[in-house]
Image (cartoon, rainbow, N blue to C red):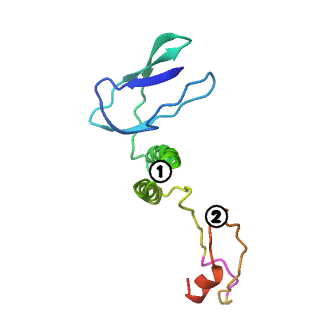
């Protein structure tokens, strides 16, 4: 299916990602996420073009609480937002897009091309032994300049 559109049945939906819904192929899901304000509709309608004909499908929505303790629904939204921002940045590199991508990744604790996660366990050492510094080689992405000695000299 091509030319996909969603009819939200009058619901107040914002920040829907991806902004441009990709083609729908048999056996390949399309994930769309957004934020609702107010009541969520029981169904939405997916419309598109399939082999030259306009088709419509009513899709039942399942209400899952955003406060499920893990924040998983919010993270799904954030991941689709970041993926959409990545595509936008490829077409039109702009500081605003990069800043929004970084802010979204940091706010939701998600790894992106601008962020990484680092786990530090300060308690994992033999009893009575002082902490020991170890230099670990790291692969740096092509095009990124990183002078390790400069950071070590400044105590970073």
| Distance between mark 2 and mark 1 Cα atoms | 36 Å
Taking 29 as reference, is 103 above or below it? below
Question: Would you identify the image quadrant in which residue 123 lies?
Answer: bottom right
* In this view, the mark in front (2 or 1): 2
- Secondary element under disc 1, as helix, strand or loop, is loop
Q: What element carries label 2?
A: loop
Residue linked to disc 1:
70
* Residue positioned 38% across, 22% down in the render: 43
Position of the N terminus by quadrant: top right
* 2 or 1: tag closer to the N-terminus: 1
Main SS, magenta residues: loop
Residue drawn at (71%, 80%), measured in percent from left and top?
135
Q: Residue furthest right?
A: 137
| Segment tinted magenta in the rendering | 122-127
Residue at image mark 2: 143
Q: Is residue 110 above or below residue 150?
A: above
Q: How many labels does the image show?
A: 2
Q: Residue farthest to the top?
A: 53
The percent coordinates of residue 40 (x first, y second) are 32, 31
Question: Does residue 144 lie above or below 56 as drawn?
Answer: below
At horizontal 52% and vertical 30% (from top left) the residue drawn is: 22
Q: Residues within 10 Å of mark 1 (few under 14, many from 20)?
A: few
Q: Nearer the viewer, residue 54 or 35?
A: 54
Query: Would you say residue 125 sits in the magenta stretch?
Result: yes
Measuring from the top left, give residue 85's x and y in whole percent: 47, 47
């Amino acid at each position: 299916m091509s030319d996909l559109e969603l009819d939200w049945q009058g619901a107040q939906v914002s920040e829907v990602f991806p902004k441009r819904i990709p083609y729908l192929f048999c056996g390949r899901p399309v994930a769309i996420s957004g934020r609702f304000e107010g009541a969520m509709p029981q169904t939405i309608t997916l419309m598109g073009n399939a082999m030259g004909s306009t088709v419509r499908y009513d899709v039942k929505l399942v209400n899952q609480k955003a406060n499920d303790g893990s924040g998983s629904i919010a993270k799904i939204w954030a991941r689709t937002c970041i993926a959409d921002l990545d595509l936008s940045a490829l077409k039109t590199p702009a500081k605003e897009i990069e800043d929004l991508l970084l802010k979204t990744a940091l706010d939701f604790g998600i790894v992106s091309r601008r962020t990484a996660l680092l786990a530090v366990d300060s308690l994992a050492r033999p009893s009575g032994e002082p902490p020991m510094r170890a230099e670990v080689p790291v692969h740096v992405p092509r095009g990124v300049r990183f002078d390790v000695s400069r950071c070590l000299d400044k105590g970073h």
